[in-house]
Amino acid sequence: MTDAISLLRQFTVENKEYTSDNDRFIFGDLAYPKDIKTNYLVYGTGKDGTPRDYYTLESIVFLLKNVELQHANYVKTAAEKGISAISRPDRKELLSYLTGQTNTADRIDRNAPIDVVAMQRPLQVKRPAEDPRLDPTKIARLEDDDFQKLKDRIEKKLEATTKEMTANQIRPLSGALSAEAILKLRAKFRATARDKIVDFKENEDQLETVAETQPVTADTFEVLQRERTWRNRTTVLQSTGKNFAKNIFLILNSIKAKEEGEQKQELLAAQRSPTRDLTVRAPVEGYSRYNQERFVPRDDTDEFKIDIHGSYHGLTLKTVTEGVQPNKLTSTTNVVPKPIPDKVDVPVSKRVSRTPIIVIPPALTSLITRYNCKELLEDLKYISTDEGKASGIKRDGDILIQRKKGNLTVPYRITDDPVRLTKQDWDERVVAVFAQGPAWQFKGWPWSGNPVEIFQKIKAYHVKWSQLKTDANIAKWSVQLIELDQNKRHLDCARLRTFWDSLDAFIAKHKPYLRY
């Protein structure tokens, strides 16, 4: 059975309209008195032996209708109208539950008794205009007649069942069987009942018969008329908790983008490495006037096919006179050596850095400078520029900070000289920039030095005192403010953590291949 506060929450979440008259609230076909007690426990009751007290439906509805009022004005208005006000500790949790932001509330007492008697009967559907209106006394008489007809029908079924049973079918077991035989039959029935499969059809018929034979009173009849199915075997298995799919898919997409970014970086590095030049170069020979004669034909002996380098040494006269060609001796000319490949010089490709870069203002009037950026971003504590100078630590060139993230440390490069950065650094590694306010800070920067276009590609921040007014240019640009208190240094850590959280989200979305 639906309680009043659950029905009110359903109508509020689904933006359904409910009406009210002098002494009750009407929710569709159900109505509740205004002074009915809900199961929402009043703060401070039910503890240390104090009796439990619950808010009325009228108090909760009045809070919903005046939620825009401040609590003091709300209490004053409720007192003027004679309505008990909701206490301040219960206000926020009760509104979150009624508006659907939470599925339950800690102050709801599930064991609280529901005032069923106080709940009104369902409103009757209006009759068509052509139907005659019945007199109230006649309506009551018709309801009594219907109840009497139902009672008579049940009694007839009981009488018919009794008449069908004959005397031959009924016999006393005690006279035909002994006590031992009855015990044996009972044990046998129990043993076979464990293995017997009950027919659902027979069981259903038996349940219907039992339901029909049970006596129906006026109270039972009224309850059955208003009974509604709240949960069944399907809805009880459906979870009503929060849906974590959005957060889980966000984490999985971040991991996927990070892995794809690393693979893309390795592919770019492989493409940038120059192709190896494996061309074999022959050694350069010195000048020799004998070697050059190899390429010039001899005009005086070419037509006679005379080998001027040949010899008859070791041949007999018979061999020469018979015209046998002597074996040609190996030419004594210098044999051209095979070219020996030189050692191939393969240039080693430069490793691409994955360290993120943060650009800070060069002016010492900014709240973040090269003299305090390490304490501000690494230690999450603000110190002035003068204190950083007085420490005596030299900070020339770029500054490398180690951001602590759990049990790991992640390096970040801090620079106040953006002119030294290459185009590749701007496109791949620069993740954040601290804006001071004047537009001349971005002179000589990429994207024509336009702050609007720069802040679309790089996350922008501005550090300011919370007591001072925001700069006009900063207010126009897409810049996230980091407001520090001039005197409360214990608040620095919490406010600077928001900087790292937003920067991590930006890197995960736009440059996941970097270390962060």
Image: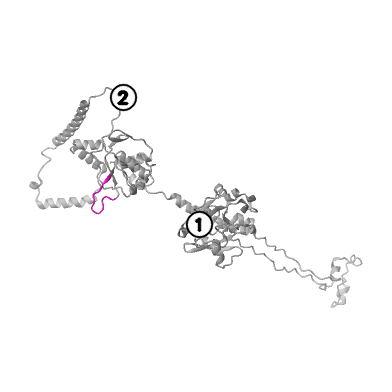
Where does the N terminus fall, quadrant-wise?
top left
Which residue sits furthest left? 175
Q: For mark 2, give the secondary structure.
A: loop
Q: Which residue is mark 1?
A: 500
The amino acid type, in three-letter code, at marker 2 is: Pro
Residue 274 or 397: which is nearer the viewer?
397
Any part of residue 2 in sight:
no
Judging from the image, the colouring scheme is: one colour
Task: Tell me where residue 123 appears, x and y as whole percent.
Answer: 28, 32
Total marks placed: 2
Q: Which mark is residue 437?
A: none
Task: Tell me where residue 276 appears, x and y as whole percent.
Answer: 68, 62
Q: Estimate the spatial distance between the alpha carbons at disc 2 and disc 1, rounded to whole Å.
A: 68 Å
Which residue sits furthest right? 300
Against 98, is 218 above or below?
above
The residue mark sitting in front, 2 or 1, is 1
Which quarter of the picture shows residue 5?
top left
Q: Earlier in the sequence, mark 2 or mark 1?
A: 2
Against 169, is 511 above or below?
below
Any part of residue 139 in sight:
yes
Residue 353 or 271: which is nearer the viewer?
353
Q: Residues within 10 Å of mark 2 (few under 14, many from 20)?
A: few
Against 129, is 330 above or below?
below
Over which residues does the magenta segment extend?
44-54
Left or right of residue 166, residue 41 in this image: right
Q: Are marks 2 and 1 in contact (CB under 8 Å)?
A: no
Q: Which mark is residue 128?
A: 2
The overriding secondary structure of the stretch rendered in magenta is loop
The amino acid type, in three-letter code, at marker 1 is: Trp
Task: Tell me where residue 173 appears, x and y as whole percent.
Answer: 10, 46
Does 51 lie within the magenta span?
yes
Left or right of residue 345, residue 353 in this image: left
